[in-house]
Amino acid sequence: MTHSWKFWGAFLLIIFLAFTVVYPLISILNLSFRGNSNMVWIDVLTDNYYLDTLVFTTWQAIASTLLTLLIGIPSAYAFARYNFPGKRLLRGLTTVPFVMPPLVIALGFIALLGEKGIINSLLQSMFNLDDAPLRLMNTIYAILIAHIIYEFTIVVRIVSTAWANLDPDIENAARMLGASQWKVFSKITLPLLLPAIIAAGSLIFVFTFTSFGVVLILGGANYATLEVSIYTLAAHLLELPAAGVLTVIQMTITIVLMAFYARYQQRAALSFNLVPNKATTMHPRGKFDKLLCVSNYIIVLIILSPLVALIVRSLISDGHITLTGFTNLFSNERDSFFFVSPLQAITNSLLFGACTVAVAVPIGIISGLLLGNSANWRKALLDSILMLPLGISAVTMGFGFLIAFNQWGLNLTGSWTIIVIAHATLAYPFVLRSILPVLRTITPSLREAAQMLGASKGNIFTRIELPILWRGIVVGAVFAFAVSLGEFGATLLLHRPEHTTMPIAIFRYLGQPGESNLMQALSMSCILMFISTVGFVAIERLRFRNLGSF
């Protein structure tokens, strides 16, 4: 029976990955070698513009990763070691920017720090200035700050999860033997945390290396990543072979990094001792402890400030407080512009999210059960393969789907099915990452004891494993729903007007002049943020033993 479900589970997983990942990637690879392929590759690899783009893409990703780790690790320590008011709520709020569409983060950044943003407006009124004192738009600083805001939660979740489950008795024993605080950290704590830190850094690098919306909106014409170049070549210049070459280069780098991430994430998960939270957390006592907790509030407030600026700006028009942006969403006045009403765009997002959960959760559960709680090189390889969609950007995924599912009689382009498949492919790794750390806490002795008492494999799963896993499954489902709700890049390439979602509607509003369109974009962004916030507050109340990260 066990071998039977594993066989059919593996078969289903292979079919899904072949259809949604391997086939589109092979289609892109085939596209890059069509026609006079050698010349296309030579032209791209010898073009100074593309070489400079690759260098810029790499170093901005490195800078974003290091800065995010520098800011996130102290915050992760505070979440892991201290009990303070609002801790669960605060931790849930750190995840909200991560699931927002990049254009929403960029819009919030503009509302906060743009030339006519809230901070510049305040500074101008306070000091009677004619010009904006802060000019961050179209600079590398805007890109780096936005990336820190976007990726901060990765450090908090992965590193704090590892830190919270390190047995403090190890550190206490070292102190009793005369080790200084610094030596305890450098010789004991840091080596134990290093796999989690490397895993978080690898994941941040992948996301910032494939950054699209943030760079496109905040960087301007002077800053372009590989992702922006791929989009420009495919959507505007129609140079598909050159776009395919850049996509192959980008995917090669991200696949290597995701394999690196999977290896260290597995090491981080296996290093947990899973001591009770009461044994690892304490109330802040000294000045340093209290200062660290207070600084955590401040950091999280800064991380959330662009989204707060969106809310404030959505309620202010021409210097007056108003709700016209929200009321217009439900008035259907702009129906002819989208071919669907704003309310229908919200409904489409909710329906796509529900369908995504229905597909992504079973795939994530099957993947987690196949990986199990044992570690070897085969499962590490399988883990890295399963994490491939996390390392493939949404634009690349949409590009691959457009090419793959529009040939040989398999034409899904323009259908709602292809959008759900794309969303589920991008979402199921989050389900897997929510379930797998919990699954790996189940010791083999529990199963062995149940088997000795005569329990079948089915009873072991339903009576032992499932009661432990259900929280991780629910967390993964919320993650999948939120990822679908905020997905932008692939949907932009794959949707038809009748399938307009909330992120697409926001993007269309931003592309139209006028205060009314801007107010509706801001208002719809607020609705998107509200739904995501509710979901992640629920996550914090459901997560098993602080586990289930990325």
Image: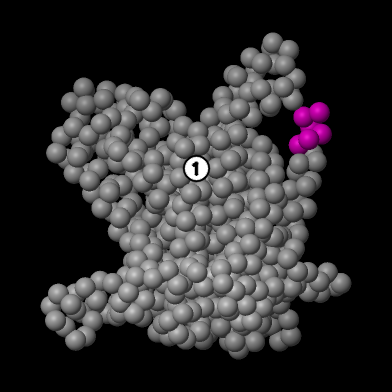
Residue closest to the eye, 254 or 395: 395
As drawn, 367 above or below 114:
above
In the picture provided, is 406 more to the left or to the right than 424? right
The part of the image, by quadrant, that contains residue 290 is top left
As drawn, 451 above or below 370:
above
Q: Which secondary structure, mark 1? A: helix
What residue would you read off at disc 1?
A: 539
In the picture provided, is 513 more to the left or to the right than 366? left
Q: Is residue 411 visible?
A: yes
Kind of residue sitting beneath label 1: Ile
- Tell me the magenta residue range: 1-6
Q: Residue 424: percent from the left, percent from the top?
A: 66, 56
Total numbered labels = 1
Q: Residue 547: percent from the left, percent from the top?
A: 48, 37
In the picture provided, is 532 more to the left or to the right than 459? left
As drawn, 136 above or below 473:
below
Q: Residue 295: percent from the left, percent from the top?
A: 23, 49
User: Which residue is located at x 49 percent, y 42 percent?
Assistant: 538
Is 5 magenta? The answer is yes
Q: Residue 408: percent from the left, percent from the top?
A: 85, 72
User: Which residue is located at x 66 percent, y 16 percent?
Assistant: 450
